[in-house]
Amino acid sequence: MNHKLSFFEKLKAYKLTNNVYVLILLTVSMFLSLACYVFPIFQPDSFFPELALAMATSLLASIFCLISDVYVQYKNSEKDQLLEGMHEFGINNLHFNKQELLEQLLPTCEKELYISGYRLILLDKIAPLLTEVAQRGVQVRAIISPPWFESFRLVYGEKEKVIDHYCRDFRALSYGQDVKAQCQVRFINKPLFSDTYKVDQHLITGPYLHNKTIFDGRITANDFFAYDLIRKSRLYELVEAENKTLWDEASLQLNWDRFAEAYRDIRNSDYRESEKVALIRAACDPVNVSVSPEEAAPELAPTTV
């Protein structure tokens, strides 16, 4: 770590801030009860002053118990450098179930959703939530390494079938208020080293893994461990800079009008995967308008069944 955390930063790192807020509330309540006892506002023979004194005494006991608990937790956590390190890096938590985390965050997403990936299998499972996000007018950006680029084939080979996932996910986003203005999908011929989503201020990221299941299929993004970053930090800035670099270096962008045509064609026909790939590829425009589509994506995926 670069610097020693202050007392208040340590409270945040040790997740004791709520305890402190409760302690402050109890203390204020106790002093209010004492004030009612010392300066009674009711008749002298009223039972209220005695009740106020009893409440103050009870609150004082609770305050002492809470102070003791906070102190013990603080001293125990003070020895744990991991908690301080996680706080300094802006890590809110670690997760192994990314789908569950996204299902918690997407219903409250209001401003920004960033997506990255190869196969979009995880997004396919939560496609209805994508539609809800788009219908709320959230700005959506997706950066994808697709099967017609060498970067995809280096990771997943030539037989992976992903276009149906693409179609369902893009279709889910197309129900937005103004899909052309609020949803942009770009394709890049570079390997993605991290699986990253941004849901408003939450940056959810983790490394891509090449593990295989017992069925010899690669594990999905949901199985990668992920960091949930919510605080501006050096790590947060590095991940955001990586996202911007990938976005700026993407060569193709989805044309929503041509995608709608390709989607209908794929849905109503019995195409092979290679033919579906060609249709989605043809539904893209160069990001740089001065570059031809052939220059932007010189390599098409080889024929796959």
Image (tube, rainbow, N blue to C red):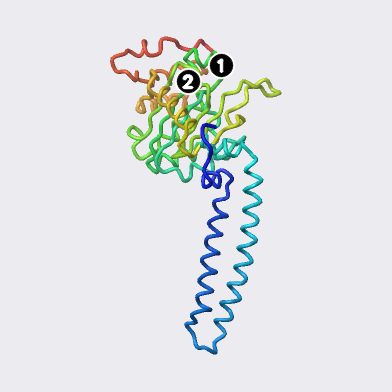
Q: Residue at x 59, y 73 (%)?
A: 55
Check residue 92 in the rendering and tell me which mark sits there, or answer none. Answer: none
Q: Residue at x 36, y 25 (%)?
A: 255
Q: Position of residue 118 (x, y in %)?
A: 51, 23
Q: In whole angstroms, how far apart are the C-alphas of marks 2 and 1?
A: 10 Å
Is disc 2 surrounded by few (<14), some (14 to 19) or many (20+) residues within 10 Å?
many
Q: Which residue is mark 2?
A: 145
Question: Residue pushed farthest left?
Answer: 290
Say which quadrant the C terminus sits in: top right
**SS type, badge 2:** loop
The one of 297 and 58 positioned closer to us in this rendering:
58
- Say whether marks 2 and 1 touch (CB < 8 Å): yes
**SS type, badge 1:** helix
Q: Position of residue 179 (x, y in %)?
A: 36, 34
Mark 1 is on which residue type?
Answer: Val
Q: Residue at x 48, y 23 (%)?
A: 269
Say which quadrant the N terminus sits in: top right
Mark 2 is on which residue type?
Answer: Ser
Left or right: 284 with respect to 144? left
Which quadrant holds residue 248?
top left
Q: Residue at x 55, y 34 (%)?
A: 227
Q: Is residue 135 above or below residue 271?
A: below
Q: Which residue is mark 1?
A: 155
Q: Position of residue 6 (x, y in %)?
A: 52, 43
The one of 294 and 85 positioned closer to us in this rendering:
85
Left or right: 235 with respect to 64? left
